[in-house]
Amino acid sequence: MNRCLDNAIASAVTSWTGDHETGATAAKGERVSKDVRLRRLVSGSIKLSELLRAGKVAPGGSTAIALGQSLEKMRVMLDPSTS
């Protein structure tokens, strides 16, 4: 049960932060700005870390993996050599 909840939380936050927006927005012909994507990643990362800190999800589960992925995406977005 806990693993299912962990997976659901990680999936929901990942979807909200825009990891799956490429297909959705490309279909609408829209582009989400880098600033909006970065704000979503920061907000999602904060929420994920709050869940981990509160002990609501396991530190080695999907939520922790999603947090790491979000942080990595922010690092890439902020790296001046990739601009």
Image (cartoon, rainbow, N blue to C red):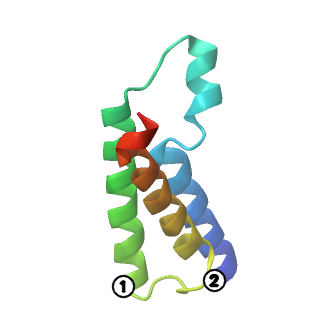
The residue most toward the top is: 29
Res 53 label: 1
Quarter-wise, where is residue 19 in the image? top right
Classify the position of the C terminus by image quarter: top left
| Residue closest to the eye, 78 or 50 | 78
Q: Which residue is found at the position 48% from the left and 46% from the top?
A: 16
Q: Which residue is found at the position 61% from the left and 26% from the top?
A: 24
Secondary structure under the numbered disc 1 in the rendered image: helix
Percent position (x, y) of residue 34?
A: 37, 32
**Amino acid type, label 2:** Asn
**Amino acid type, label 1:** Arg
Q: Is there CB contact under 8 Å for labels 2 and 1?
A: no
Q: Compute the Cα span from label 2 to label 1.
A: 16 Å
Instruction: Identify the residue under disc 2.
Output: 2
- Earlier residue among tags 2 and 1: 2
| Residue closest to the eye, 71 or 83 | 83
